[in-house]
Amino acid sequence: MAMAGLYRRVLPSPPAFDFASHEGKKLFVEAIQSGTMEGFYRLISYFQTQSEPAYCGLASLSMVLNALAIDPGRKWKGPWRWFDESMLDCCEPLEKVKATGISFGKLVCLAHCAGAKVEAFRANQSTIDEFRKHVMKCSISDDCHVISSYDRSALKQTGIGHFSPIGGYHAGRDMALMLDVARFKYPPHWVPLTLLWEAMGYIDETTGQQRGFMLISRPHREPGLLYTLSCKNESWVGIAKYLMHDVSLLLKLVDATDIQKVLSIIFTSLPSNFGEFIKWVAEVRRREDGDESISPEEKARVAVKEEVLKQVQETGLFKHVAAFLSSANSCCQNLAPLSHQDDFPDIAARVCCQGAKMLAGRSGSSDEYCCQETCIKCLKANGDKPVTVFSGTVINGKSEQGVDVLVPSSRTKPGCCCSVSSNYSGIHPASNDVLTALLLALPPETWSGIKNEKLLQEISSLVLTENLPTLLQEEVLHLRRQLYLLKRCQENKVDVDLGAPVS
């Protein structure tokens, strides 16, 4: 009787040793005793088999993301938030990955998009000694994990390109444990590190570049420090569609010749209620009687926010956006809620009310909160430069609550006094930086429809994520991830929860 298909492969040994073999067990015990298997335990807790023959990259990444306890910020099934291969589609359509696999660069993009910190190296960008050092680093700790992109043929295995997480390292024998996610084909196995390095040097014929490895860890801070997107308002569906679909079509239809024209095309067609879509992430605290001090932790957080804001304002794109919004021809009605109707005191007063509700545990209630006696202050922390604070007294029926909003400021410092009529030009949020951040977060393919080749190159250079400083890059990738999630949720008509921004 004929039987269709294949049931596993025989692991070529040598050069590899099956994890469950006598030699594999011996290597495992010795590596544990040497302390180079610390990363193994979390990885093995989330070890999975790829669900499609070409999903080795997606399975390896989702396994590592879950091992690092990175919250995807969206539901998988039921009430559970959990990384699954089907959720890793923000850099390459799943159908395309299913058909042809995914490149090294696209998997790096996916890891960033999923909220991880990523250090990626192609084989020609590193050395075997550096690779060994990185493998050792992630083997003696569970704070990071290595995913290797290599050619199976170098290991005498069938197939060509493959991704696998490295589960541990045996220093004495210089061997790495490959937790092969194609468990239907080969079991986990030990391979000589030198041979793995050679396998990573093979050329990927689809890209013409060498393969490599990536170190994945939790980000040093949570992303979304300054901005987040809101799906609480029903208008988010139309706005997400406009940004992720319509903008690219508009740029194809109109023959733009300069950047100001491109900005005009995008901004003059913004959907109504756009100002409700991208939100300012504010930090709110209860105001204690007589205590106006700033803690070191609060000061540090505000300092990072101000650095991100500074980095936004130092981009070339920001200068173009600022010039467009200040020009006589930029009377965009749909930008009015963002740049004209709401000045800083109005926004901050609403934040005080929202914060007071949250502090009282009544964020979902319909109770009326009114902010009175507002003022701007500059508080010093241990004699350092002052921190800008917006203070308000929030009234709810007969009760009242003093609330402070810690405000990141740009280099143009506002005056600090107890008056709501002060100059707020240096205080965040402002439409210039909010719109700049959102434009940077648009998918790279958004701009491909621009017909003018010189203009396309200029725009592409302005929005290139890799050119951004680390803090701003994390902020932008966080926003881009949220945009992709909104797009998927809009297409699938399912609910999404991007958090509860205070704005």
Image: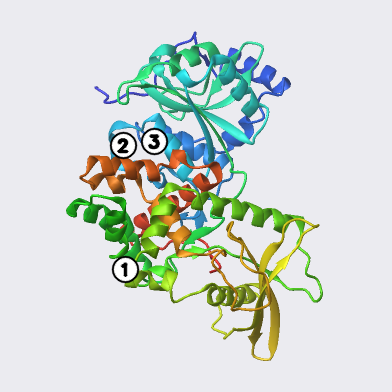
- The mark tally for this picture is 3
Amino acid, disc 2: Lys
From this view, report whether residue 104 is shown above or below residue 387.
Answer: above
Relative side of 382 to 239, left or right: right
Residue highlighted by disc 2: 98
Crowd band around label 3 with a 10 angstrom C-alpha radius: few (<14), some (14–19), many (20+): some
Instruction: Give the secondary structure at mark 2.
Output: helix
The residues bearing labels 1 and 2 have C-alpha atoms spaced at a distance of: 35 Å
Relative side of 413 to 105, left or right: right
Amino acid, disc 3: Lys
Contact (CB < 8 A) between labels 1 and 2? no
Q: Which residue does the image show at 31% across and 37% down from the upper left?
A: 98
Residue highlighted by disc 1: 271
Residue highlighted by disc 3: 106
**Viewer-closest of 142 and 484:** 484
Crowd band around label 1 with a 10 angstrom C-alpha radius: few (<14), some (14–19), many (20+): some
Nearer the observer: mark 1 or 2; the answer is 1
Percent position of residue 45, x then y: 58, 37
| Residue positioned most to the top | 14
Nearer the observer: mark 1 or 3; the answer is 1
Q: Which residue does the image show at 20% across and 51% down from the upper left?
A: 252
Amino acid, disc 1: Pro
From this view, report whether residue 332 is shown above or below residue 38.
Answer: below
Q: Which residue does the image show at 78% across and 65% down from the upper left?
A: 293
Disc number at residue 427? none
Q: Which residue does the image show at 65% across and 54% down from the upper left?
A: 303
Q: Mark yes or no: residue 485 visible.
A: no
**Viewer-closest of 130 and 435:** 435
Percent position of residue 490, x then y: 33, 60
The residues bearing labels 1 and 3 have C-alpha atoms spaced at a distance of: 31 Å
